Amino acid sequence: MTVVAILAVDFTLFPRRLGKTETYGVSLMDVGAGSFVFSSSVVSRFARGKEKRNLRASRRKVMQVMLLGLARLAITTMIGYHSVETEYGRHWNFFFTLAVIQVCADTLPIAAHRALPFGLLISFAYQYVLSCHGLSAWILQAPDVRSHESETNVLTRFVSMNREGVSSACGGYFAIHLIAAHLGNALSKPVLNFSRWLQTMAIVTCAFWFAAIASHAYVEPTSRRAGNAAYVLWIVAFNLQVIIVYVCMTWFARSANGRGKCDIPVLASAINRRQLFVFVVGNALTGLTNLAVDTINADANTAWGVMSLYLSAISIVALAMDRRK
């Protein structure tokens, strides 16, 4: 859905109500970044209880993601590609957010089975700063009224220019990572009683939905840009709900065919194993498509044709990379 939406939103055929919200609220495209972090974390080495990477391997992983972020920044700057400053900031992009999460995860000595309270604590502490110390108003300030000239320190100036990305990465997305890792650790345990498992998961999901709605209504409305507590809780609740649906579908499929195994489509497995790579390919093809096609003025037939070719290309690349191991 994320790979589809990042190009589809450039066509007028795509409903505007599904695009990213400007300040507060929730929409389809607000799910993408949070769900990417959640789905990566819920099956991460950290969640599965494996030993952390050594310093060299961890540094290599961070540098790979940082290089992707720098490459995207350099290319979009050189070709004058349009970017929305209110998404992450003037220079920041989602790859930098992933790098920050990786650094924080490798630095803090938190066990996966204890990560949930730490994730909630970080989210609530961050929300306190957002609400009580004016951070939220500062982050959500419109780009045309922001002033960076008064900042003499280079680091302070950089943070000011990229306030959405820096703040949400350290507060919101890292909290999502910790909560997802804890849940992933719990989900990796064998299920001895499916009915009891389903009941427990339903209670946990409802608790997160209740907390998300209460936080949205009484603390601060959900904001993807700020990555506030309501956004963190909403992303967790949404993805837990999705997991329950997928597990139930698998259980019914197994019951229907009378086997203990449920066949997973080859394309789904290929994309699951190379989620970041597929996301990078989607980003690259989105940029190339916008350079080659006037997406804003394209008619419906052109939009459907371009999207079909785009998704076919991504699917072929994912399958080819999976086959080559």
Image (cartoon, grey):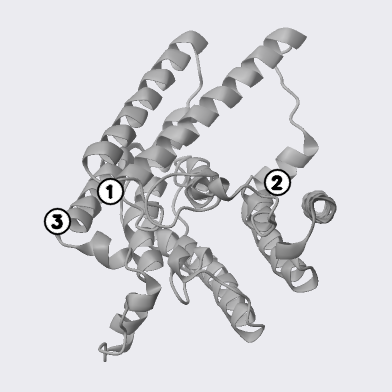
**Can you say whether 122 is above or below 263 in the image?**
below
Relative depth, front residue between 110 and 82 = 82
> What x and y, as percent, mark residue 8?
69, 53
The amino acid beneath tag 2 is Ile
Say if residue 274 shows up in the picture: no
Label 3 sits on residue: 132
**Quadrant in the rendering for residue 218:** top left
Dot 2: what SS?
Answer: helix
Numbered tag placed on residue 123 in the rendering:
1
Quadrant location of the N terminus in the rendered image: top right
Number of callouts: 3
Q: Residues within 10 Å of mark 3 (few under 14, many from 20)?
A: few
Distance, label 1 to label 3, CA atoms, is 14 Å
Numbered badge on residue 276:
none
Label 2, on which residue?
271
Can you give x and y, in whole percent of width and height, for residue 47 in the image?
A: 45, 41
Upstream in sequence: badge 2 or badge 1: 1
